[in-house]
Structures are given as structure tokens and as C-alpha cells.
Image: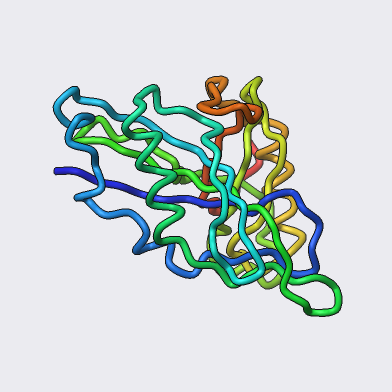
């Protein structure tokens, strides 16, 4: 069986309100998998850097983490440009503005499914006030495989806990150095679902 999963992280531009992907769950389809890639058994992760205009349309796409398969890289940008729809970023006055957005897609067949959404568990001595659920965080890794940026996508219910989890991700996580598929610097996007559990301190 073929699976395509998506993960996203907004770009570094400072805005009062970052762009929001409106149709991430419906962006990739099984029939998007290129026939040539299937015939060759190609699989892998493609990370992209998108340019989003004030109307929420994708106007540019660059592959910053190549899957190693040209057909997979090409179709990833094609799908993003054709289907991705955003609530645009807004500045401090509320006006819609151009922005950037980082997106990752994984392609695989059966067991050959590179993960881009990764569960993690962190032990704490006490759960922070307001913590109600795992936090969903997006990390962007640079060409050396170390985290360049971590952002909260869905809060745990406690902003301080979210920031602490991002801090832990930034301090401890490393991925294999990505290779760029364009003239842009290499960067890989991953999603982490972080759950806090009580630790006995041993």
C-alpha cells in the first residue's frame, strides 16, 4: 500500500500572524506517486520552501531536501503549487502580506516509509499547569543536520511547556544532513508529537 504524509513549518519571516495551510490533510493523494518512481522503487522525504502571496496562493517552490529521486522532487512542488491553499500571513496592522512556508512530504511503499511525524516522550517531575495534551511542534534542520528553528503548531495547553519542549528538541535532536534539490540552502522539515509524562526522578 502507498502512503503519502505531509508536515509543514512556517518560514522565518517575522509576522504578526504567520500563514496557515488550510488543506494539508488533502494536499497529497496516492495517485500523485509518479509511475517512474514506483517502477524504480523510489522513496524518501522531500522538504520544500514555498513562497505564498497575499491571496494565499503558492507562487514559488524550491526543494531544500531532495529525496534522491527527481520524479518525487518534481511532483512535490507541482502538487504544492497546484493545491496548497493558505490563510495568508498578516502584518501588525492586519493586512495580508507575502510570506514563506516550509513543507515536507514523505513517499514510501509498505515498510519503506521514511517518517516525518515522530512521537517523543519527555519525563518531567510535575506536569505544568494547563497541560492537557501532547504538543505538536515543527523543526527545521540545517545542512549540518542540527535544528535551525523549532515552532509550536498545536499547543499542549501551556506555552512555557511548549517552549521548553522546543528547547529540548533544539539541544538534542539531529537528523542526517539533508541535501538540497535546488539552489537554496539545504533544510529538512520534521514534525514532533511530544508527550509529557511523570518521571520518578531516578
Viewer-closest of 196 and 120: 120
In the picture provided, is 21 more to the left or to the right than 78? right
Q: Position of residue 66 (x, y in %)?
A: 46, 28
Quarter of the figure that contains the C terminus = top right
Q: Is residue 196 visible?
A: no
Residue furthest toward the bottom?
A: 94
**Residue at x-position 14% and y-position 43%:** 1
Judged from this view, the residue extending furthest toward the front is 59
Task: Report the colour scheme.
Answer: rainbow
60 on left or right of 3: right
Q: Position of residue 4 (x, y in %)?
A: 30, 47
Image point 71% across, 57% down: which residue? 161
Q: Residue at x 25, y 48 (%)?
A: 32
* Residue 58, quarter of picture: bottom right
What is the x, y in percent for residue 72?
34, 34
Whether residue 90 appears in this view of the structure is yes
Residue at screen point 66% across, 61% down = 127
Which residue is nearer to you in this view: 182 or 160? 182
Q: Is residue 65 above or below residue 75?
A: above
User: Could you tell whether 125 is left or right of 111 in the image?
Assistant: right
Amino acid at each position: 500500500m502507498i502512503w503519502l504524509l505531509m508536515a509543514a513549518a512556517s518560514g522565518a519571516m517575522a509576522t504578526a500572524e504567520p500563514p496557515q495551510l488550510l488543506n494539508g490533510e488533502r494536499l497529497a493523494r496516492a495517485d500523485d506517486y509518479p509511475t517512474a518512481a514506483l517502477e524504480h522503487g523510489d522513496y524518501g522525504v522531500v522538504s520544500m520552501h514555498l513562497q505564498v502571496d497575499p491571496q494565499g496562493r503558492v507562487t514559488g517552490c524550491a526543494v531544500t531536501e531532495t529525496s534522491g529521486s527527481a520524479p518525487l522532487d518534481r511532483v512535490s512542488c507541482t502538487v504544492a503549487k497546484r493545491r496548497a491553499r493558505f490563510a495568508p500571513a498578516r502584518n501588525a496592522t492586519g493586512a495580508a502580506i507575502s510570506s514563506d512556508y516550509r513543507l515536507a512530504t514523505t513517499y514510501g511503499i509498505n515498510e519503506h516509509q521514511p517518517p516525518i511525524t515522530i512521537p517523543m516522550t519527555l519525563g518531567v517531575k510535575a506536569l505544568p499547569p494547563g497541560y492537557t495534551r501532547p504538543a505538536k511542534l515543527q523543526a527545521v534542520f540545517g545542512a549540518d543536520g542540527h535544528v535551525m528553528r523549532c515552532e509550536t503548531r498545536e499547543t499542549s495547553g501551556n506555552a512555557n511547556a511548549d517552549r521548553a519542549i522546543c528547547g529540548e528538541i533544539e539541544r538534542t535532536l539531529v537528523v542526517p544532513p539533508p541535501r538540497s534539490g535546488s539552489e537554496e540552502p539545504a533544510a529538512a522539515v520534521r514534525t514532533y508529537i511530544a508527550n509529557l509524562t511523570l518521571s520518578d526522578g531516578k
